[in-house]
Amino acid sequence: RQLRYAGMMETIRIRREGYALRENHESFNNRFHLLLHPSEQGEGIAHLVKILSNRLNVTDADWQIGHSKIFLKRELANKLEMLAMLRVHAAARTF
């Protein structure tokens, strides 16, 4: 019963479903909004996820948006990290 109240049961369920990584909305948005073209910038985490899903050809099964956090499968998280790193390196080379 204590585990349920502490949120452990929910954490275990999420990890079992394969969403190994979780990050709060603000942090995720700050890290990955740079992957959008200025004309694609929009409001909120749902907009960012929708654009990135289309671009990466992934489904909602690869990530889930919670009330305060976004949950990602490890493979998708690795792709996003690589794309962000490439974008930063490309921007650095243009200076």
Image (cartoon, rainbow, N blue to C red):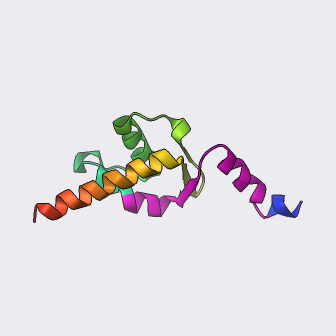
Most foreground residue, 46 or 17: 17
Most foreground residue, 44 or 16: 16
Q: From the image, which quarter does the N terminus lie in?
A: bottom right
Q: Main secondary structure of the magenta part?
A: helix
Residue 57 image offset from top left, x and y in percent: 39, 33
Q: Which residues are magenta?
A: 6-31
Left or right: 56 with respect to 92?
right
- Name the residue: 13% across, 62% down: 93
Instruction: Residue 94: name its quadrant.
Output: bottom left
Q: From the image, which quarter does the C terminus lie in?
A: bottom left
Question: In this rendering, is residue 9 above or below 63?
Answer: below
- Name the residue: 56% across, 56% down: 22
- Magenta-drawn stretch contains 46: no
Question: In this rendering, is residue 82 above or below 2?
Answer: above
Query: Most extreme residue toward the left, as rendered?
Result: 95
- Magenta-drawn stretch contains 17: yes
Q: How many marks?
A: 0
Query: Most extreme residue toward the right, as rendered?
Result: 1
Left or right: 6 with respect to 93?
right
- Name the residue: 67% across, 49% down: 14
Residue 46 image offset from top left, x and y in percent: 46, 46
Residue 13 image offset from top left, x and y in percent: 72, 48
Question: In this rendering, is residue 30 above or below 38?
Answer: below
